[in-house]
Image (cartoon, rainbow, N blue to C red):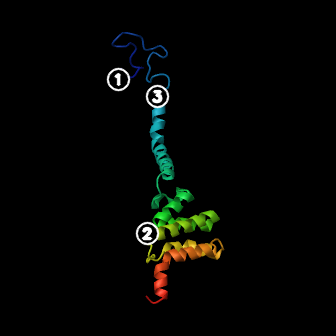
Amino acid sequence: MRARVPQDTAMCPKCGTSLAGPKAVGFLRYGRRWSLLVFGVFLILWPVLLFYGVLVAQHLFARVSPPRPSNMRQQTTAAILQYVATSLDESWGWQELEYRLQRGDLSQTDIDQAIDGVIAFMRSSAPQGYDTPIHWADNVLKPAYLAGAIDNNRVASLLDAFTAPTRASKTAFGA
């Protein structure tokens, strides 16, 4: 019945059924096709679901993966302190500690652990003294010291690890 107007044709040319009665010709299928509706909604929402799924996955994997520059904000303070203690010369951990110190998220224990980690790293990696300046640590250690969060014994231990007693004593005695 394609290309034929129902008003012009009274009988079906194929089967001979009268087309004059109500609902004799169905131009559309009756009822909704729910599967097509669900598929259409899925196609519309797919990019949004994919985008948020990737964000959630990145957030979850950042918490369990080791600290990297791209995921420092998601790491726990303990993980950041571990990272700083093993990679003293890299700025990312120190910048995150500075950010947390400014926000007031670092406790006295966290500051003590950071300094103890630095001291242990210096003594193990350079027992004769650490010759490289710790530029990134200044932004954490100076404000913490000025605020009274670092006691003088820890400062003395840090300076001792930085300069090494053997080198300091040789320099002092002119050797």
Residues packed near mark 3 inside 10 Å, few (<14), some (14 to 19) or many (20 plus): few
Residues packed near mark 1 inside 10 Å, few (<14), some (14 to 19) or many (20 plus): few
Q: Return the x and y of residue 39 as percentages of the image width and height.
A: 45, 33
The answer to which image quadrant residue 29 occupies is top left
In this rendering, the answer to whether 139 lies above or below 62 is: below
Q: Of the residues shown, which amino acid type is indicated by label 3?
A: Ser
| Marked residue nearer the N-terminal end (2 or 1) | 1
Near-viewer residue (93 or 26): 93
Q: Which mark is residue 2?
A: 1
**What is the CA distance from the residue labelled 2 to the residue labelled 1?**
87 Å
Q: Which residue is mark 3?
A: 35
Q: Of the residues shown, which amino acid type is indicated by label 2?
A: Ser
| Marked residue nearer the N-terminal end (3 or 1) | 1
Q: Of the residues shown, which amino acid type is indicated by label 1?
A: Arg
Q: Is residue 5 left or right of residue 151?
A: left
Q: Return the x and y of residue 97 as percentages of the image width and height.
A: 55, 66
Of all residues, the one furthest to the bottom in this rendering is 174
Q: Return the x and y of residue 16 as percentages of the image width and height.
A: 37, 9
Q: Which residue is mark 2?
A: 125
Asked which secondary structure carries label 1, the reply is loop
Q: How many marks?
A: 3
In this rendering, the answer to whether 36 lies above or below 24 is: below
Residues packed near mark 2 inside 10 Å, few (<14), some (14 to 19) or many (20 plus): few
Near-viewer residue (94 or 27): 94
Asked which secondary structure carries label 2, the reply is helix
